[in-house]
Amino acid sequence: MGKDIILKAENISKQYRLGQVGTGTISHDLNRWWHKLRGKEDPYLKIGDTNDRSTKGDSDYVWALQDINFEVERGEVIGIIGKNGAGKSTLLKILSKVAAPTTGSIKSRGRIASLLEVGTGFHPELTGRENIFLNGAILGMTKKEIAAKLDEIIDFSGCERYIDTPVKRYSSGMTVRLAFAVAAFLEPEILIIDEVLAVGDAEFQKKALGKMQDISRQGGRTVLFVSHNMAAVKSLCTRGIVLEHGKVVFEGGIDEAVSEYLKVYNIYNKATFLNAPILEVNVEQENEHLIIKAKYNSNEKIDIPNFGFIIYNEFGNPILGGNPVIHNLEIDIEKNFKIGEIEAKIINPRLVDGAYTMSIWFGDSKENHFEALECVMFEIKSMVDIKYVNTSYIGSVTPNLEWKFNIN
Amino acid sequence: MNNSENGATPWLFEITPKNKFFSLNLNEVWQYRDLLLLFVKRDIVTVYKQTVLGPLWYFIQPLFTSVIFTIIFNTVAGIATGSVPPFLFNLASITVWNYFSSCLLATSDTFKANAGLFGKVYFPRIIMPLSIVLSNLIKFGLQLLIFIAFYIYFIVSGESLSPNFTLLFFPVLVVLMGLLGLGLGMIISSMVTKYRDLTYLVTFGIQLLMYISAVNYPLALIQEKMPDYSWIIDYNPMAYVIEISRYMLLNTGSFSVGSFIYVGVVAIAVFFIGLLIFNKTEKTFIDTV
């Protein structure tokens, strides 16, 4: 028995034109047509920069994706991870047949249903029940399939009382729940999901995550999942593909993929800077403590090396932060603080397992000279003794609790 | 493909940069037939929700337009409609014209109006314009009922009216008209994705087109009064559609097999050209719209 490949991407590339699309494209269209007429290649396909948003390229065209190749086996749950703008959404759009690739092809042995958004095509004037049918049909189900699952869908959504009320009267939370319920009962061979978990309240997110786990575990369904939530990716996926600047930089087991993702950006526990007052920043977990170290070399004389930091969880929500000034630190002002090292030990921050990012600032008591937003990424492992929790639901800090039970 | 890497199951489908030159995937459209019907239902059910008069609006528009046309064109301007009451003459023309114009207007907006939906989920894009043509067909059917009601009213009140035996071919004419509206709409909707100017052109273009489509005058009148410019109307397939349907319904005006065939050829040609352009656009429009 060979591998049972259900999906195969071959040399997928996608080019976008930057700037004002629409005006002035007639000349490009004509030029293209003229090249085609003479049997030549599309002149605009050759030029183009890689998709790096931080630098300014010369070309009007960029490659959002370049030469993407991968294979997916039946029953695999694949996480596609990468920074914002790495090309994840573009790849999903191509896989969902919403956008066409510029070159390459995707071959599939199964029906693909994609969930790039919940509630696509919901009509506010129609009732919940009518919208279940409409939305289901849009996602590729037949009327019969939907009718067979109608009760389950309504039950899962928890909107039973309102099912014959127009959706425009629903709260936004109810709409999302209903929409996700429809999607959760889709039965395609391949399911493509893009950060749908980022919507809805925490309770719903938990329910959705649980349902997704069910789908992938017992359903034997092939799932492609894009998310920034490393904890969700790790718990759901078996394999990972890491994208950077529109290229596949890693493909393999999910744990390696996640650490590769963190390493790719060279922001794993450490960041170095050139031509900046801050030379280097380090974050290390030391048992239950977190230690931040920074080396600085300032051109100007500063009264106090004011090094600030904020730590964010994987959803980008700030968790904690500080700097010497807000903490009223007394420092000998007569000294020259041009060059030195700073260490901040966060005693027992009690963070739950997961990936965190940190932004830093540097200056003195009067003004800020330097900032680097979310420049360091680090992982916390077994800092607190706690079972797996959904951080989007409960938060990232575990309180130091003392329980008392008065049992009668 | 090499069979060693898989159990020789063929690929179900392939996603490529471009559609084949001509690929109407009827199979796929059939798979999504439920969606087509649900879209039709949605269009019909939701249009006049939360209005007091509800579906009566389907009848008010053609009736009032006919009254105004009768006053302006027949009473004031004195256009003769032969033995047919002018009101019925106008009602017939407007009912037929409305079907064509609403098909054209709604389908020409397909890509732009549904960009949000098309950007998130795949289904055969042709479902959208098809559903528009079908829901308009139902609307057209309802409006025909009103026409029939007035038809009977005029017969009861002593007018000598009778349809022509060619009425048997009326459904064919309606289908051709639908194809023409759909085809033109698909061509325009594909071009609108790149050149937005067309949106503005369409709305008033349809109004202008109405005046050269023999809606409010018999075709013969133009040929008689403006022989030098009547070619504008002679080449307009919609003028024939209107004229022929009046001939079928009211036994007035002219009819020739030649003009019927002309309409058929143009409608089918426009439909296939529309399909071709639509097919080409559906893969790339999301990047340009």
Image: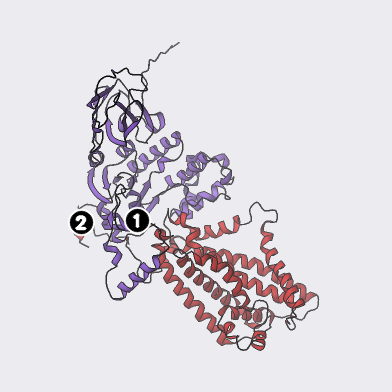
x, y percent for residue B143 = 66, 67
Query: Which chain is disc 1 placed on?
Result: A
Judged left or right of residue B57, residue A402 is left
Residue to which mark 1 is pinned: A94
Q: Residue A346: name its quadrant.
A: top left
At 46% across and 55% down in the image, what residue appears? B117
Residue type at mark 2 is Glu
Residue B106 versus residue A210: which sits nearer the camera?
Answer: B106
Residue A110 versus residue A401: which sits nearer the camera?
Answer: A401
Question: Which corner quadrant holds the C terminus of chain A?
Answer: top left
At 56% across and 56% down in the image, what residue appears? B42
- Chain B tint as drawn: red
Where disc 1 sits, the SS reads helix
Location of residue A176 with respect to B182 vertically, above or below = above
Which of the numbered marks, if any, corresponds to residue B5?
Answer: 2
Say which chain is purple.
A
For the rendered model, the colour scheme is by chain
Query: Which chain is disc 2 placed on?
Result: B
Q: Do discs 2 and 1 share a chain?
A: no
Which of label 2 and label 1 is nearer to you? 1
